[in-house]
Every structure is written in structure tokens, then in C-alpha cells.
Amino acid sequence: MEVLPAEILALLMDHLLDNQLLPVSMVCKRWRHLLFSMCHRSVRSGLALAAQFGYMSLILWYVDVLHFPTHTICVHAAKGGQSQVLLWARGRGCKWNASVTSAAAQAGRLITLQWLHDRGCKITMDAFHQATASGQLTTLQWLASIGFRPSTRNALMHACSHGQLKIAKWLVETFGAHFDKSICSLAAGGGHLTTLQWLVSSGCGWSRFTCSAAAAGGYLEVLKWAHENGCPWSSSTCSTAAQSGHLKTLQWARRMNCPWDSSTCRGAAAGGHLKVLKWARANGCPWDIETCKAAAENGYLSVLKWARENDCDWGKGKEVCERAASRGYLTIVQWARENGAEWTCSTFAAAAAGGFLPLLKWLRQNNCPWDENVIVYSERYGYKEALHWAIEEGFPCPWWLSKKMGIEPRKRRNRGPLEQQATQDDDNEEAEMSSEDDEWNDNTMEL
């Protein structure tokens, strides 16, 4: 029986009525745990709202009856400007730190921010950046008055990436201009055409990444204006549009003779955008082995199938198996093997580095080559279940790791084909050396 992914179940459970919760929770343990975790998240959201709007009776119920921790209450209370809740939370052991003042600054709660400052709560440059991104000019002016002097470049990056033109102008007027090309890219990537126009008119430079950023976001009007006003572009404009699935943007760029190369097909495959990939190929875009590798690494089996059906190169398939294994995509590894892909020890090692136990077991059952990296990577990245399984299966373990884990070296039950061949070669070499040795004379120190 096919098991529904947790994400699909969660979407279905979001539509349950109150009188349906109990019977659904009794279907199985998995459904019950998922339902309870969703309820827990909902309750946490309720506590955040209670703190933000100052509902003390509700906060007390959450904390005293449901025993919810108080460490996030101050942040949400600061967002709502609830000084009484802040005082109560501090009395219950909730810390006042920089995250609290940053929350107040982001929400534009200047009176609360000043109140916290007067009581010794720390304010860092993060508060300045949060206020910049959310357009809180009055808060920024007060922060400047108490001595905050930001890096103009970093502050402009925060303002322009969020389209805060008024803030950007104030920063330049107050602290001086410090433009670089990346600021235009950030404005374009957020679709902020007016901000981009102001930057260019103020002398800020741009580069091919400006067009790429606009294309990646699908902001066609921004891309059009940038190109019409002399902004350079490159093949990355097409590849980023393809990876984000913005077919109309890609089509317009090509009509304007924007260059492309195999990275466009790779981008479409990496994003799982089969329609974009088909259009690109139908219009003469080249592709290579990277297309199949990108589809496998990102779990898009339908894209990989179509690419192979249409003769996209994948070499011997080794890297396709390795990329898919690194993300735990068992079905893609299975399909690749069924369709002639080769594999190596790297496939097993990639699965071990991700701790994908079902995939590891399948690889083991189907005689995928392995080496000591199965245990090394499982231990290095903390996948205890995979590590214990590998030890029980008798996988090779280097002596230093055996010593570290406190396990006794033992004879392995099974060995991979590469290891078997290596062992046989060593035995043959040792036999040849011994047959050639003459008896050593300890007295003369000669043969």
C-alpha cells in the first residue's frame, strides 16, 4: 500500500472539522503523531498572538496550564509594543536580549524600543538593519541619534532589496553614498523597478547579474527596462529564468537575442520545469550531461526520463546515481540502474553521508560497490541508525574509527566486489614476493 507523504497528509488535515479530529487520530500512530504536532504548532501560534496583542489571561493559561516555555514571549510582545507583557515575562525568567530590541525595531515600535533601551536591553546593528528592511524611518533616525553608524553599503543593500526607496534616499543623505553593482542586482531581484531606476540615476553601477536577478524572479518589466537602458546580460539571464520556470521571461530574452548555452537546459532540469526544457530544446538550446545530473540531484524523475528518451547524454550514469543518492532519491537510483546506469562506491558513500537508511539497505541488497566511507560518513555526520546498521552488516571500518567508537575489529560477513578484488590482488602479490625470497643469513647480513 502506498504511503502518503506527511506534507500531503498535513494539507488534508488542515481541512478537518472539530468532530473529525478524534476518529482521524485513531487511524494509526503516524496519523495521530502528525495531527498532534499540527495542533501543537497551532497552539504556539496562539501564544505568539496573545503576547503580541497583550492578552495576559490567555498568556497565563498557556504558561500555567499548558506549561509552554516563555523564551519567545518577549520577542512577540516587543513586536506588539506590549511593555506590561515584557515586564511580566522578565519576571518569569524570559531573557531580554538583542532579538527583543530587533523585533521592536522591525515593527516600528519606537516607544517600546526606547523603553527597553532605558532599562538596559541591548541594541545591536541588527535592529538597524531590521528597521531598514521594514521601512521604519523614525526608528532609524532615533537609532542614528544615539550613535548608530551603519556601513552605508550594507544598509543600502537591506533597503534596496526590500524596495525601501525612502529609506535608501535617507541613508545616502545622512551617511553618504556607497554604491556598488550588487545593490542594483538586489533591487532587480526583488522586482523593485523604481528603486533600480533611482540607483542608476544616482550613479550606481550594474552588471550582467542585474539582468540575471530580474530573470530569476520573473520580473519581466524590470528586465526589459534594464536591457533597454544598456545593462549587460549573458547566458545566465536565460539559465536563471529557466531554473525558476519563467518561460515568458526566457522567451522574451531569446527574442532579444540574449545568449544561451547548455546551462539553460541544466537550469530547467534543476528546477523541474519540463515545459521550459521542452521549449528550450525545440528552439535549439544545447544540453549535456549536466541536464541529467541536475534532474537526478533535485528529484525530478519525469524530467530525467524525458531527457534520456530524447537522447540526452549522461555518460555512464555514475554521477547520476551519485547525485540522486546524495539526496536520498531511491526511485531515481532504481530507475537509473534499470536503464543501464553504472554505479561506484561513491553512490553508497553519498547515501551514507545523507543518512538515507532505506536507500542504503536497497543498495546493499543490490550489490552496489562500497568501501569504508559508508561507516566513516555515517559516523561523521551523526547518523547513528545508519552507523549501527552498517556495523551490523559488517562494512569495513578503518582502525582509527574502530578505536574511537570502542568496537572490536571483527571478521566481516560480506565484502563488496571491489574489496574482494583488492584483497585477492594483495594475496597474489604477497605470494609472488615470498616465492622470490631466499633465506636470510643473520650472521653475514646477506642473502
Image: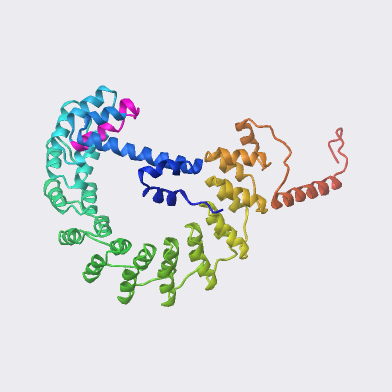
Magenta span: 63-80
Q: Looking at the image, which residue sits at the far front?
A: 19
Which image quadrant: the C terminus? Answer: top right
Q: Looking at the image, which residue sits at the far top?
A: 91
Image coords of residue 247 (percent x, y):
35, 69
Magenta-colored stretch includes residue 65 = yes
Image coords of residue 214 (percent x, y):
28, 62
Query: Looking at this view, is 295 or 301 the one in front?
Result: 301
Image coords of residue 308 (percent x, y):
54, 69
Image coords of residue 168 (percent x, y):
16, 51
Say if 443 sits above or below 181 in the image. above
Q: From this viewpoint, is residue 22 visible?
A: yes
Question: Going by the image, does 209 lie left or right of 309?
Answer: left
Q: Residue at x 30, y 75 (%)?
A: 256
Please tell me whether the stretch drawn in magenta is mainly helix, strand or loop.
helix
Q: From this viewpoint, is residue 97 visible?
A: no
Magenta-colored stretch includes residue 167 = no
Q: Residue at x 11, y 37 (%)?
A: 145
Say if 406 sits above or below 173 in the image. above
